[in-house]
Image: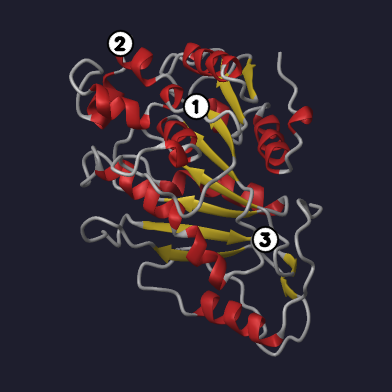
Amino acid sequence: MSLRRGASRRPYTAAIALSLASALTALPACASPEPVAKVDPTLDGPARLDEVAVQRFEYPTRVGEPDPEQNWADLYIPAGEEEVDSLPLAVIIHGGAWQSEIGADAFDPLARELAARGMAVYNIEYRRLGSGGGWPTTFRDVADALDHVVKVDEVFPQITIDDEVVVGHSAGAQLAVWGGTRHLLDDDEVGSRPRFRPTRVVSIAGPLDAVYAAENGDDRIVKAIGGTPSQVPDRYAMVDPIQNIAPDTPVVALHGSEDTVVSPENSRRYVTSARRAGGDAKLMVIDGENHVSIVSGDSPNYSKVLDTIVSVSDSDLDKVVTP
């Protein structure tokens, strides 16, 4: 993948290569189960990885003690030459109805596919319903994981963090779109004052109109937020994507035409509202895909999902072809 946005081409020094080698070999106790590639600390010049490397980070939480089993994120670094500010970063947030049954490992294949295309990928885990999450912990965790990207960049200076994409599926899509608009929140609201702000978003099968979803039978979002829109309207106002539209944050919403878990109407309503607000938003309804198949490697449309993520990351939304 070519460099974007005028990124620096300064090569690694031996000291930077040594820092990378230390990060890859001195994994914390809850390290990624996959083996990681090692870097020769004597390298002088561009570092090179011969395979995708995975590094686990445990991120701190602003409120309360973190859970090391859940407050972590895996960084995937692609094979090839490594230069400072040379790797665009994609943050990915898994779904699963904000519940503990599905975790970040479900997005490991997607992370590796994107890394194979030359991107660095930051795959977030967070506490969910049934494992200490819910309101407001789940949302705080995602905000804290996003903000930790600044520290990740200090260890891996080859990634760029100035104009990056965040991608989410299902509940993760709601969290992703919200994560790209946290700068709009008041200081006393959950997730406000971001240290790292993704500036473009890909939503896959997301409940982007949380009030509409809750009022049309989605009890999962009601449980995640801790009440109905009429019971806790202030909470919905904080985290509902359609109530926190940032016109300067482009959003591409992908949705399967056969999705009966999260209606495509959620994406349609959000994109319509974002366009009315002057935002750059696109809707892509993929024929024949349901809520799960749209992110399955077995789907004939999977490459279309990957191509969309790469195009949005490259700031080339004109390549995103919508019906």
Crowd rating for badge 2 (residues with CA inside 10 Å; few <14, some 14–19, many 20+): few
Residue at the image point whose x is 26% and y is 45% from the top: 137
Nearest to N terminus: mark 2 or mark 1: 2
Residue type of the residue flagged with mark 1: Ile
Name the element at disc 2: helix
Can residue 55 be seen from the camera position used here?
A: no
- Disc 1 is placed on an element classified as loop
Compared with residue 26, is residue 308 higher up or lower down, i.e. above or below? Answer: above
Q: Nearer the viewer, residue 19 or 34?
A: 19
> Looking at the picture, does residue 251 appear above or below residue 314?
above
Q: Nearer the viewer, residue 317 or 296?
A: 317
Number of residues whose C-alpha sits closer than 10 Å to that of mark 1, classed few (under 14), some (14–19) or many (20 or more): many
How much space separates mark 2 and mark 1, taking CA atoms? 20 Å
- Label ID, residue 215: 2
Which residue sits at x=76%, y=36%? 316
List x then y, in percent, for residue 272.
56, 13
Q: Nearer the viewer, residue 134 or 96?
A: 134
Q: Nearer the viewer, mark 3 or mark 1?
A: 1
Residue 244: name its quadrant: top left
Provide the secondary structure element on which disc 3 rests.
loop
**Dot 3: few (<14), some (14–19), or many (≥20) neighbours within 10 Å?**
many
Residue that numbered label 3 is attached to: 78
Residue bearing mark 1:
245
Is residue 122 shown left or right of residue 29?
Answer: right
Q: Name the amino acid, label 3.
A: Pro
Q: Which one is in front in this view, the residue at disc 2 or the one at disc 1?
A: 1
- Of pointers 3 and 1, the one earlier in the residue sequence: 3
